Amino acid sequence: MEQRLKELQQQALQEVSDAKNLKELNEVRVAYLGKKGPITEILRGMGKLSAEERPKMGALANEVREAIATQLEAKVEMLEKATVAEKLASESIDVTLPGRPVRTGNKHPLTKVVEEIEDLFLGMGYQIAEGPEVEKDYYNFEALNLPKDHPARDMQDSFYITEDTLLRTHTSPVQARTMEKNEGKGPIKIICPGKVYRRDDDDATHSHQFTQIEGLVVDENIRMSDLKGTLEVFAKKMFGEDREIRLRPSFFPFTEPSVEVDVSCAKCGGKGCNVCKQTGWIEILGAGMVHPNVLEMAGYDSKMYQGFAFGMGPERIAMLKYGIDDIRHFYTNDQRFNTQWNRA
Ligand code: 2U9
């Protein structure tokens, strides 16, 4: 029996050592230490031994059992550690690998130019004011010194909704509303960006809906020189520090005097070329001193308060700055156009 136990121990330990995984190891456990296994059988048969041999064999059988169990435990632990190590190795992440590129969108070129202009005036202490696109005839025309019989009110030129509401034809009503809200007091220093609408046939330079940015400054002691200095800073920041501006007399019902403002041509530096039609100058905006009638209608004493105003079309500014030849590009959403303006 002693011999049999020793053989069993040797055999079991060999099988433990040969087991390649936890499943095989469990099979060894069941085969040797299970209820139907040879060791249990031997222990059950102890009764048949002599009183002298019984304790000796019992102790030996238990020793063999212990030895196998201890080896099994050790092997289980080893296999478990190996499994964890294998899993860690296979799941390791190479943090030095380059990331997958993410395709980002970009702002519309018109949005970029509007924001550039806004930032420029915000930097000069202006605030941004907004107002409704469906506007009262009063704020769109009357308050801006365009009386009832003025030709600009023609049904042919504006999108009327009712007799006294229309899609605004400029952003000037926002300034008129702001002045009214300020109840005759200064200072006001605002720019008004937004969509405007005019009855026009669309072509390379006209669109029935376009964008405007207008500015208004109202305070005591505002002079034409303030307007000129402001527009000079704007033109240089927008088109280049070596650009110059010139003012030409013009007419708008809401300003007196009124001017049109040109910037020296960036391509030829003023010598004359195809971009500036050989004149050396390019028109970029209109401006003037706020008409006393406009100040008075909004509740300002025009002897105490003066103002200057200006208006520009960001599409035109963008077309000049980036050499875009057709205003319709801004509104037809061709991705080849929209995605080529990825400068920050
Ligand atoms: C108030 C008082 C005065 C706004 C002005 C212009 C001159 C002007 C055009 C340029 C090209 C519009 O985009 S465009 O078609 N604008 O020339 N706008 S002065 O004057 C105002 C506005 C509001 C209360």
Image (cartoon, rainbow, N blue to C red):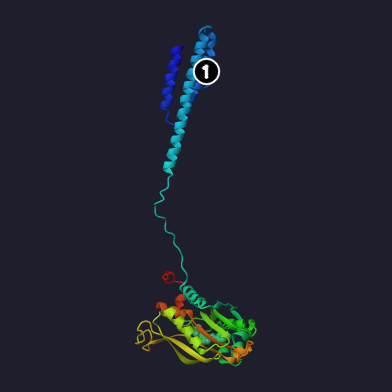
Query: How many numbered marks does the figure carry?
Result: 1
Q: Which image quarter is the C terminus in?
A: bottom left
Residue 164 picture location, percent across and down: 64, 85
User: Which residue is pictured at 46% across the width and 34% down the height?
Assistant: 80
Q: Quadrant of residue 13?
A: top left
Residue 287 picture location, percent across and down: 50, 87
Closest to the observer, 252 or 167: 252
Closest to the observer, 237 or 259: 237
Q: Is residue 256 above or below residue 211?
A: below
Residue 19 picture location, percent across and down: 43, 28
SS assignment at label 1: helix
Q: Residues within 10 Å of mark 1 (few under 14, many from 20)?
A: some
Specify whether 100 is left or right of 46.
left
Specify whether 164 is left or right of 315.
right
- Residue 281 seen: yes
- Residue 325 seen: no
Residue 264 picture location, percent across and down: 40, 85
**Residue of label 1:** 40
Q: What kind of residue is marked 1?
A: Thr
User: Which residue is pictured at 44% across the width and 76% down the height?
Assistant: 329
Q: Is residue 9 above or below residue 104?
A: above
Closest to the observer, 144 or 303: 303
User: Which residue is pictured at 45% across the width and 80% down the height?
Assistant: 317
Is ligand 1 closer than 8 angstroms to the Cβ of mark 1?
A: no
Q: Is residue 251 above or below residue 204?
A: below
